[in-house]
Amino acid sequence: MDRSLTIGDYIQLEDGRAGTLRELSIRSATLETYDGMDIMVPNEKFVTTSFTNWTHNN
């Protein structure tokens, strides 16, 4: 990826789901929600749809 995501970032997806990035693999990312649930997001979503990285510094 283009380094726009790092472990610990708080990500909000285009559909409104949000969470802290806990794991990033070749195929998917895992976001942990505020209530402890995991959201598995295919990496394709980060290329083809909009998302907000609320903690990205650059």
Image (cartoon, helix red, strand yellow):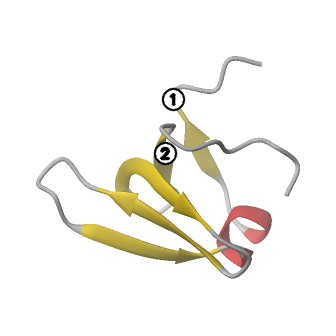
Asked whether the residues under the numbered discs 2 and 1 touch, taking CB atoms below 8 Å apart as contact, a structural biologist would say: yes
The quadrant in which the N terminus is found is bottom right
Write the residue at 68% across / 17% down: 57
When the figure is inspected, residue 51 is found, relative to residue 9, above or below; the finding is below
Residue that mark 1 sits on? 54
Q: Position of residue 12 (x, y in %)?
A: 46, 48
Seen as rendered, the residue at the extreme top is: 57
Residue that mark 2 sits on? 11
Visible residue check, residue 48: yes
Task: Give the crowd class for mark 1: few <14, some 14-19, many >=20 residues within 10 Å.
Answer: few
Write the residue at 48% across / 38% down: 8
Q: Quadrant of residue 39?
A: bottom left
Q: Distance of mark 2 from mark 1, alpha carbons? A: 6 Å
Sooner in the amino-acid sequence: mark 2 or mark 1: 2
Q: Does residue 36 appear to the left or right of 25 in the view shown?
A: left
Q: Does residue 46 appear to the left or right of 19 in the view shown?
A: right
Q: Does residue 43 appear to the left or right of 18 in the view shown?
A: right
Write the residue at 60% across / 50% down: 51
The quadrant in which the C terminus is found is top right
Dot 1 falls on a residue whose secondary structure is loop
Amino acid carrying mark 1 in the image: Trp
